[in-house]
Image: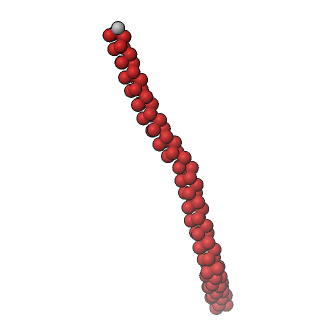
Amino acid sequence: MAGLEQRVSDLEREVRTLKAKVQTVETKVDVVDKDMQGIPGLIKAEFRLVDSRFARVMAEFADLRPAMDERFTHMDDRFDAVLRAVSETIVERDKRS
């Protein structure tokens, strides 16, 4: 009978140990589940941040566009003036020759 009581005690101890391990694993799984639930939110927040930055950059480019167009127009005028001067110089040189 003592052997049977010892065996029952051993089995009860093993069951308590297994319950403790299961609770530990369930706690870890709950923590991982909570972490995983936050990841999609973090990804969405990161996309919103990138979209916001992209929108700001595009707005800044839109603000710069008129200034750049004006500068290019001015450069085109200067380029045309240089071409006219070179053409006139060539014509004058050909007249002298």
Q: Residue at x 62, y 72 (%)?
A: 59
Q: Quadrant of the C terminus?
A: bottom right
Locate the N terminus by quadrant: top left
Q: Look at 64% across and 79% down and name the residue there.
A: 66
Out of 33 and 2, give the one closest to the viewer. 2
- Residue 2 lies, with reference to residue 75, above or below; the image says above
Q: Where is residue 61 in the image (x, y as percent from the top left)?
A: 60, 72
Left or right: where does residue 23 sit relative to residue 47?
left
- Location of residue 54 with respect to 85 vertically, above or below: above
Q: In this view, does 11 lie above or below 27?
A: above
Residue 5 spot, x, y in % from top left? 35, 13
Q: Residue at x 44, y 33 (%)?
A: 23
Q: Residue furthest top?
A: 1
Res. 94 in view: no
Is residue 74 visible in this depiction of the protein?
yes
Res 76 → quadrant: bottom right
User: Which residue occupies the foreground of this view, 96 or 44?
Assistant: 44
Q: From the viewer's perspective, is residue 26 above or below residue 87? A: above
Protein image colouring: secondary structure
Of all residues, the one furthest to the left in this rendering is 2
Residue at image position (45%, 31%) is 22
Q: Quadrant of residue 6?
A: top left
- Nearest the eye: 66 or 32: 32
Outermost residue toward the front in this view: 1
On screen, residue 41 versus residue 27, left or right, reads: right
Q: Quadrant of residue 47?
A: bottom right
